[in-house]
Amino acid sequence: MNQAISKLKDCAFINKFRCILSSKFFPFITAAITLLCYYLGWDMALIYYIGITGILMLLLLDDVTPVIHVLLFMSVMISLKNSPSPAMGGSDYYHRTENLVQIAIVITAFISAGIYRIVTACAKKKFKVSPVFMGLCGFAAALFFNGVASDKYIPKNLLFALIMAACFLGIYSVLCCNLKLDKNAFEKIAFGFFALSILLVIELIVAYATTEGIFADGKIIRDKLIFGWGLYNNYGVLLVMCIPAVCYLASIKNYGFVYTLYSVVLFVASFFCCSRQAMVGAALIFPFCSAILLIKGKNRFANICIFVAAAIAAIILIAVYREPVYVFFKDIFANIFVDGELDGSGRTKIWREAFNNFRFNPLFGVGFYTKFSYEGKTGLGFMPSMCHDTLLELLSAGGLLLFIAYACHRVQTVQSFFKNVTLERFFIAVTVLAMLIISLMDNHMFNIFPTIIYSSLIAVLSASEQKYE
């Protein structure tokens, strides 16, 4: 098979095709195709496109960095028309046998291509057992013990552990030994997030323009902000994770102030998506990235002017529209405190439930499929309800064993970053940090697609520990 693929790579047409797949323009092509399929309801066509391009990248490219673009757009594949979400009417599109068979074939082919890359990397002695890899192995292994010895244990706990282990360890293993990272590769990754952010902004604008009843009594009805692939909270975490990449592009490009201006747009969008977690995440991440941009980036004077102008515009708009702004934030944060006590939109109740689950079985937890008092309906039957906090979810589902394994993994990733602190690795680390911050208030770490993105970014950090050009 290696010989056949090597001969295929020598073909002139295939060489040109490889250049397209690895170009900086590919994520924008993918974003355009994703938007088209999203609004036309061509989910299966998009699944084939994402799957086939990912497989070809794994088979034909020496540097699989562009696979990260494919993983990014996997998160936004499901269209409004075919969404299984109960909020969208609960389409049966993803429950039909003919569709499930096709999806299974694409997934199997993609996984097979990934296994091929791991095997060939091992044969060429390119696979290195790093501390991050060992920590991730320990974390993946601990997942399989979730709920063991609990009377609430069910076989689905084992299945979910297998899926999560594949997301964490499988994606990392495929990417880490097949990445060729230099400044150009990091720029390509940043363009992937930039292209994703454009898609997200367009979908948000269209949602506001076309959704009936989104405004009522001078308020934004955020429950109407539904995307085929998720609610406003799912939207918010992806949007905030795009901010560091845009700021990185602003820091390295000669006309980077254009990206600086766009980063302000993303910051504003994080509030208009009405996700409180996204607002908190953006309020922490955006100033941090902006400060680094002003210290390390080009176009310092232009960037300062943009930030000052944005701040002045915000102050003027708040002053002029202070009543609607006050109503907006009052309505959004209305149920954080109830009767003078912290309620956290019902989160404190499920956090207590999670802690009680941990007390019930402190070593192994009670498993991922223990029900919480809220209805965690996703439209996908195998997805468990979770407690809206990564750390408490670890304790509740997997007990001290899973929590300690995660803590070791977290320490090793931090150590990995500080082995080679660069501007490129900084934007990767802050993107991960954005997800981790928001995941302290919502379910993202164990939500498959965000998990896949997380694993790919950890692979990039681990693979770039040595100095590069």
Image: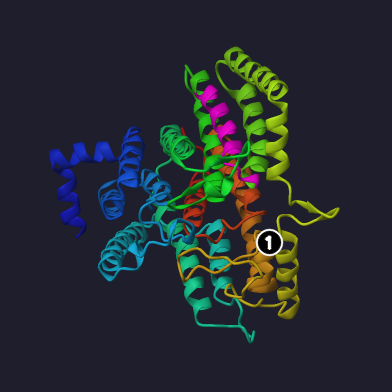
Going by the image, does 215 lie left or right of 196? right
Quadrant of the image containing the N terminus: bottom left
Going by the image, does 140 lie left or right of 398? left
As displayed, is residue 233 above or below residue 312? below
For label 1, the crowd category at 10 Å Cα-Cα, with few meaning under 14, some 14 to 19 and many 20 or more, is some
Residue on which disc 1 sits: 391
Dot 1: element: helix
Q: Is residue 266 magenta?
A: yes
As displayed, is residue 199 above or below residue 64? above
Q: Is residue 139 magenta?
A: no
Main secondary structure type of the part rendered in magenta = helix
65 and 72: which one is in front?
A: 72
**Picture mark count:** 1
Instruction: Specify the segment rendered in magenta.
Output: 259-276
Image quarter for residue 296? top right
According to the image, what is the colour scheme of the structure? rainbow
Image quarter for residue 329? top right
As displayed, is residue 328 above or below residue 98? above
Q: Residue at x 59, y 58 (%)?
A: 443
78 and 72: which one is in front?
A: 78
Q: Residue furthest right?
A: 340
Q: Position of residue 216 (x, y in %)?
A: 59, 41
